[in-house]
Image (spheres, helix red, strand yellow):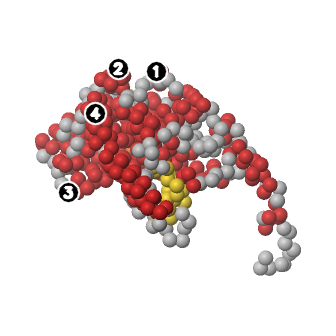
C-alpha cells in the first residue's frame, strides 16, 4: 500500500545525488537554498535557521524515544512469538530513529546530553500522539497503521529538507517506517477478519486513534507559526493541512479493505476538489495535550526520567571500564 | 553520558565497495562504539565491515577556506583527458 511512498523516498534520494553532482557555483546560504542543494554542518547559515532546525530535529528525536513507550507496553503481552519478535524489532527501530536524529542535531552544535535534559525537564516537547494510552492489542495495530502512517506522510517530504544531515537521516528513517506501517495494518486486518469480538476491538482502536492521528499534522495552516519561514528555507515542503488531506485520502481506501469504519459522519468524496471532505480534529484538545494535559503526559515523562536515572550506573560503569582500559593500554 | 566521546561511523556495504560515512554516536570506548554502531547502523544487513573513528581524531578542511583550498584545481583543465585533441585514427588512447 505504500509502494508509492517508498518510491517517493527513492526519488528524493536520487535527487539528492543529482543535486550533489551538479557543479553549481552556489556558495552563499541563499544561493545554495535557491539551487536546491544541501546546507552542510559547518556552512554559514542564519542563526534562526540553525535554531529552527535544532528545535525541530530535537523534538523529532524525542518523539521517537518517547514513542517507544505506548508499544513497549505490549511487548510482553503480544499474542504470538512472531508478533512479539516483530514488535521488538519495531520498537528497537524507533530507538535507532531517535539516535540518527540526535546525531543530526549534534552537527548543529548542540550536545546530546543537553537535548536529553531538555526533554526530561520539559523545555522541549515531543509529538502529542504519544500521550494517548494503548488499551488493547488492537491499539498496536492502529499505531502502526495510523501513527506510523501519518509520520511517513510528514517525513517523506523531509527527505528533501535543505539541511543535509537531517535529509539523510530522514531517508533512512522512512525506509524503515514502511515496515512499521505494514505490520500495524496486518495486525488490524487479522483482527478485523477474526471473531466478532476481535473485529469490535479493531474498530474501537480506530475510533480512538483516528482524530489524534489527524492532529499529528499540527494546527491548521491559519494558526501555524513558523510555517512560512520554514517553507522559504526549504525545511518544510508542504503545509500542515495539505499533509493532513493527503493522509485522509490515503486512509479511506485502506479502511475499506480492513472492513472498518472511519469514525467521521462528515467524510465524503468531494468531486470538485478531487479529495475527501472530513471533520477536523479537535485542535483545542491538541493544544491541551501539547501543554501537558493529555491522558499520559505525566506517566511518559516520569517513565523516561526513571529509565534515565536507573541507567546511570550502567553509563558510569562503562565509563570507568573505558578509563581503566585506557590507563592499562598507556602503561603497557 | 556527557563525558562519552563522539565516534564517526563508516560502513562497507558489500565486498568490493569502500567504507562510507553513515553517521555518528557516543560511546565510552572504541569497542563499545563498534558494538553500538552494529546495532544502530546495520540492523538490516547494511554492511559487512564497520570502522569507528574518534571524531576528535579527525582533522577537517574548513568551509571558510573552501575556495582558497580547492580553487587551484579549477584552472587545470589539462589534468582531464578530455582536454586533449586526439588525432583522427589514433587508437588505444
Ligand atoms: Fe520512527
Ligand atoms: Fe515507526
In this figure, which residue is indicated by the disc labeled 1?
A223
Q: Quadrant of residue A327?
A: bottom left
Parent chain of label 1:
A
In this figure, which residue is indicated by the disc labeled 2?
A284
Q: Are marks 1 and 4 on the same chain?
A: yes
Parent chain of label 4:
A
Residue positioned 51% across, 35% down in the render: A54
Where is the N terminus of chain B found, in terms of image quarters? Answer: top left
Position of A219 compared to A40: left or right?
left
Residue positioned 71% across, 51% down in the render: A23
Q: Earlier in the sequence, mark 2 or mark 4?
A: 2
Q: Residues within 10 Å of mark 1 (few under 14, many from 20)?
A: few
Q: Position of residue A72 (x, y in %)?
A: 26, 44
Parent chain of label 2:
A
In this figure, which residue is indicated by the disc labeled 3?
A81
In this figure, which residue is indicated by the disc labeled 4?
A302
In the foreground, B66 or A2:
B66
Q: Earlier in the sequence, mark 1 or mark 4?
A: 1
Residue positioned 29% across, 26% down in the render: A294
Q: CA distance from mark 2 to mark 1?
A: 12 Å
Amino acid at each position: 500500500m505504500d509502494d508509492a511512498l517508498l518510491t517517493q523516498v527513492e526519488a528524493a534520494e536520487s535527487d539528492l545525488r543529482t543535486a550533489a553532482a551538479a557543479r553549481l557555483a552556489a556558495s552563499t546560504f541563499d544561493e545554495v537554498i535557491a539551487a536546491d542543494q544541501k546546507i552542510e554542518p559547518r556552512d554559514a547559515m542564519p542563526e534562526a535557521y540553525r535554531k529552527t532546525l535544532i528545535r525541530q530535529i530535537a523534538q523529532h528525536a524525542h518523539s521517537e524515544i518517547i514513542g517507544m513507550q505506548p508499544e513497549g507496553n505490549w511487548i510482553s503481552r503480544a499474542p504470538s512469538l512472531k508478533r512479539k519478535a516483530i514488535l521488538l524489532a519495531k520498537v528497537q527501530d524507533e530507538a535507532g530513529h531517535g539516535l540518527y536524529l540526535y546525531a543530526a542535531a549534534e552537527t548543529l552544535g548542540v550536545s546530546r546530553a543537553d537535548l536529553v535534559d531538555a526533554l526530561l525537564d520539559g523545555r522541549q516537547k515531543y509529538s502529542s500522539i504519544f500521550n494517548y494510552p494503548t488499551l488493547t492489542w488492537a491499539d498496536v495495530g492502529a499505531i502502526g497503521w495510523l501513527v506510523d502512517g501519518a509520520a511517513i506522510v510528514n517525513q517523506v517530504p523531509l527527505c528533501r529538507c535543505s539541511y543535509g544531515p537531517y535529509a539523510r537521516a530522514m531517508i533512512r528513517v522512512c525506509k524503515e517506517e514502511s515496515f512499521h506501517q505494514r505490520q500495524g495494518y496486518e495486525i488490524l486486518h487479522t483482527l478485523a477478519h477474526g471473531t466478532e469480538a476481535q473485529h469490535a476491538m479493531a474498530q474501537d482502536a480506530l475510533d480512538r486513534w483516528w482524530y489524534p492521528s489527524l492532529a499529528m499534522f499540527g494546527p491548521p495552516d491559519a494558526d501555524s507559526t513558523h510555517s512560512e519561514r520554514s517553507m522559504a528555507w526549504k525545511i518544510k515542503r508542504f503545509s500542515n493541512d495539505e499533509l493532513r488531506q493527503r493522509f485522509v485520502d490515503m486512509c479511506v481506501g485502506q479502511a475499506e479493505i480492513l472492513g472498518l469504519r472511519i469514525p467521521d459522519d462528515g467524510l465524503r468524496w468531494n468531486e470538485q476538489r478531487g479529495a475527501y471532505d472530513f471533520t477536523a480534529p479537535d485542535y483545542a484538545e491538541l493544544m491541551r495535550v501539547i501543554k501537558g494535559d493529555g491522558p499520559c503526559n505525566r506517566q511518559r515523562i516520569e517513565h523516561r526520567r526513571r529509565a534515565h536515572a536507573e541507567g546511570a550506573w550502567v553509563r558510569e560503569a562503562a565509563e570507568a571500564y573505558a578509563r581503566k582500559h585506557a590507563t592499562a593500554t598507556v602503561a603497557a | 553520558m556527557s563525558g562519552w566521546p563522539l565516534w564517526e561511523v563508516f560502513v562497507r556495504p558489500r565486498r568490493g565497495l569502500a567504507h562510507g560515512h553513515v553517521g555518528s554516536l557516543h560511546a565510552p570506548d572504541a569497542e563499545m562504539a563498534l558494538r553500538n554502531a552494529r546495532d544502530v547502523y546495520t540492523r538490516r544487513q547494511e554492511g559487512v565491515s564497520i570502522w569507528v573513528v574518534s571524531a576528535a581524531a579527525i582533522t577537517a578542511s574548513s568551509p571558510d577556506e573552501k575556495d582558497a583550498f580547492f580553487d587551484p584545481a579549477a584552472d587545470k583543465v589539462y589534468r582531464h583527458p578530455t582536454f586533449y585533441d586526439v588525432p583522427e585514427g589514433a587508437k588505444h588512447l
